[in-house]
Image: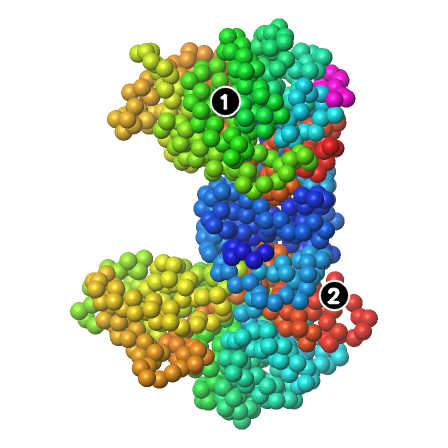
Amino acid sequence: MNLDYEYYKTTRSLCPGCKKILPAKIVFYNDSVYMLKNCKEHGEFFTLIYGDRRKYIEALKISKPALYPLEFFSENFNGCGASCGLCPEHQQHTCLPIIEITDHCNMSCPICLAGNHNGWHMPVEKFKKIVDNLIKAEGSLDMINISGGEPTLHPELLEIVEAANRPEILTVSISTNGKEFLRDKNLLTKLIDRNVFISLQFDGFDDDSNIKLRGEGVLEEKLGILELLEKFSARTSLVMTVMRGVNHKEIGKVVQYFLKKDFIRSLMFQPIVFANPGLEYDVEKVITIPGIAAEIAAGSGGIIRESDIINLPCSHPTCFALTYLLKLDNSTGGEGEYIPIPRLVEVEQYLDTIKNRTAPGLESESYEKIKNNIYSLWSSSGIQPQSGKILHSLKNIMCEIGQCGKDMTPQKLFNVMEKNIKSLFIHHFMDAYNFDFSRVMKCCNQYPLDENRLIPCCIYNNMERKR
Amino acid sequence: MKKDAKRKRDYIYYDFTRSMCRRCGKIIDAQIIFRDGKVFLRSICPQHGASEALIAANIDWYLKVINTRQATDRPGKFSKEISEGCPYDCGLCTWHEKACNLPIISITNVCNLKCPICFTYNRDDPEYFMPVEEFKQVIDWLTASEKSIDLINITGGEPTLHPELFKIIELCRRKEIGRVTLNSNGLKLAEDEDFVKKLAGYGVYVILSFNTFNRDIAKKMHGADVLKKKLDALKNLEKYGVQTTLMNVSVKDLNDKEIGKVIDYALKKDFIRSVTIQNMTYTGFAGGRFTPRKHLPIDEVIDNIVKRSATVADRAHHTIPAKLQNLHKKTRFSPDNSIEHREKRLTHDDFVPLPGSHPLCYSVCYIFRDGDYTFPLKRLFPGDEYYEILGKKYLVHPGENFQRILSDKINEIWARKDSYPESERILKMMKNMIGKLYPTGEHLSPFERQKRAEKFIKIIYIHAYMDEDTFDLSRVNRCSVLVPGIDKTYIPVCTYNLFYREKDKRFRKAGERGIR
């Protein structure tokens, strides 16, 4: 490698050719962060891992202590990646388990990281065991995610959702391309009746990029699905996979749409992952957290700034970044307006509030912090340009929470928060090109496998998944 | 609300790296963790469990230095391809990130002391003295592959016991080589004045192992009553004006609090160029058994210096003109205005990572010095220019850049006198220095200029070698202190100490196994 890069540190990664573990260097080049590694058989790899050197360094600094799960299913550490999991050296509990209930799919996206074989559905009994084990490891969970394949193709999906309906589990979300809902509206209403969160794959309003990413022009169908979701007031999350030069310019439009629509509670951006063997790696197509944050800021019409999007200290900080948006009171008419919560509170306190949970304000401790922040905001009114509106909105939230009094359950609190606060995430999964053991050691998204294993998603996708 | 039943870890996971297991010597996964404001390397051996070693006493210091720019200076030549992976391909293999700053050549394993702190895997069975011809081979390929070498370090064992030492030194007199530095425990230097005189004649720089002024502590560290010998050695070195570095091995709760005294002494003496503090490294035949094993990180050494060295202040204080006294009191360089003599003590900010090394391996403090007057250099150059001055190597290269930076600074001080304390004195010193380094009508070789610059500078190096507990592949990858072999190979010194020396056939009987 003859480029004039600056060395930063070493870690371990994978060879994109043979998936063997390789030593890797993290280096700085052109103010971005790259990974450099060398496989005896497959040669040298120089891959972009983070688009901004300064932000990368700052992100790494915000790490917070991990929580132990209640139980480790793997007793011994045999080197990271060889003893999942979770093993006692893993540096985070399972915040969001992703349970793949089928490998059937009604699409065949060129960018799919799952590698579906259309031959298997998870038996409901097995799902129940997985949930039992999750509760053993975690005690309680804010959310479990049901995924696939395409989970709506599972013939017993509703039974599975029922099986997850337990007091220890606050919310169930389903990751879907949504096509089944057009065919079977009943399925959708039944899921909504069961309070399921619909996590809809949606990559933007441009069908050319849909063809590139999804293998077909799905825009019309997606708009139809969104219409249904809105009509039934489904709790909806949009998940957008972003490939630079293909649909990254759609980010702004998607953000605008998200802010306009009350039924969309959260928006998730996932930078493209080169895990599908049919997808050729192209550094020009790589986008990382800072690149997406810049597009969000540019496209949000001044509502969200890059500095509002903060790396998450409980996951590895370069895996997740997010912001929460407070809905401003619009009783005086007009469309809902939003203000990013990081601008209302001190960043340090904000970090304490968001850590280790999927939704804000669910720990009594952080609830107190939010309350204190609101009070201090009260006393400093006039500082924020929209402080009147902000205070009014906060006051309403406080009243709603206050009315519940001692009956306040996490579920009720969650509902109040969800109605008033939208969340925006960036989640950067890894492929063999940017795979970094320093990140995976702190992963908080696990696949529960078989009866007794929780395996970090990126380890599974890159080291164990059969394709 | 339901109380979360999950327990918090008592540390923060910061990073992942690879280290080694002290018990089995295997390369294993490791975490960099923060606990109680400190930084530890937590090595996790699948067979032998986890162990932790302190690598920084303060998280802020750690984050600051690891995020300081590392000057890019990759080796021009490699002798190996990547095969088994670091550290098994030395070397250098194409994975290595840093060219040589400091070649270390061990010319013997024989020593007349058996120091309990010695971190070299040094056994004198069989006795080995490097043949002069072999040394020549090493120097030949070194000078053939590097255009210019600031210094060659000759060490041992105790190199002054080599019967043909001066032939070896003679071989280093080449235009490509700036100087020879010779490590010594000082016994020979104390006993043989003529020997010292001869060293002076050859222009050899001596690196004298000097840990303490306390006789009992010296006994503990060296296993013999050596203090008087050390002082005699210093006397001889001073007498013949041999340019000397004090090499201080700092052991926590033994001699570490004495470092201020050693630095005070060094700053007072003309013949002493620099002090190198090496944190005790618990490896090698003796050091590996030294107890208790308490790791002393660089920032704790800096802390010891800052708290215990008063010299810069006392001496500067006498030279401040009366009219500047008031100004001096108010300077932004004075964190503690209450005690006059503390004002110009060294501060933590006077130390920075050496840009030509890994930031956890070296910190350095340059002190301007002109006669009785001293001033820490970093305070004149708080920004990036300082890293430019320090350059990519072990020694400063006072070339045209340096002249430009100095001249710019002189102009700046001239224009903004009030914002610099003691501006008159600093200006005088800098002008004096420029006059000597860049004399009109006289051509100086770079090495000659380097030597002249040294007259104006005292240097404190803090060098953290690694042992089995602190070994970190992230660091060794940037190692600039290399051991050259006759086979045209270089091995990074910590890798050599931990993985190669015990296999080095020159130093051990065939078939004998290492200590692990």
Depth check, front residue: A240 or A397:
A240
Q: Tell me if mark 2 has few (under 14), some (14-19) or many (20+) residues whose alpha carbon lies within 10 angstroms of its own.
A: few
Residue located at (58% from left, 67% from top): B76
Above or below A295: residue B144: below
- Residue B501: x and y in percent read 69, 69
Q: Chain of mark 2?
A: B
Q: Which residue is mark 2?
A: B515
Which amino acid type is shown beneath numbered disc 1? Phe
- Residue B181: x and y in percent read 54, 79
- Residue B196: x and y in percent read 52, 89
Q: CA distance from mark 1 to mark 2?
A: 67 Å
Depth check, front residue: A106 or B161:
A106
The disc at residue B21 is none
Instruction: Tell me which segment is drawn in magenta.
Output: A118-131
Q: Which residue is mark 1?
A: A205
Q: Is residue B304 left or right of residue A134?
A: left
- Determine if marks 1 and 2 fall on one subunit: no
Q: Is residue B468 left or right of residue B420?
A: right
Q: Secondary structure at mark 2?
A: loop
Q: Is residue B454 left or right of residue B406?
A: right
- Can residue A1 be seen here? The reply is yes
Quadrant housing residue B81: bottom right
Camera-side mark, 1 or 2: 1
Quadrant housing residue A303: top left
Which amino acid type is shown beneath numbered disc 2? Ile
Q: Chain of mark 1?
A: A
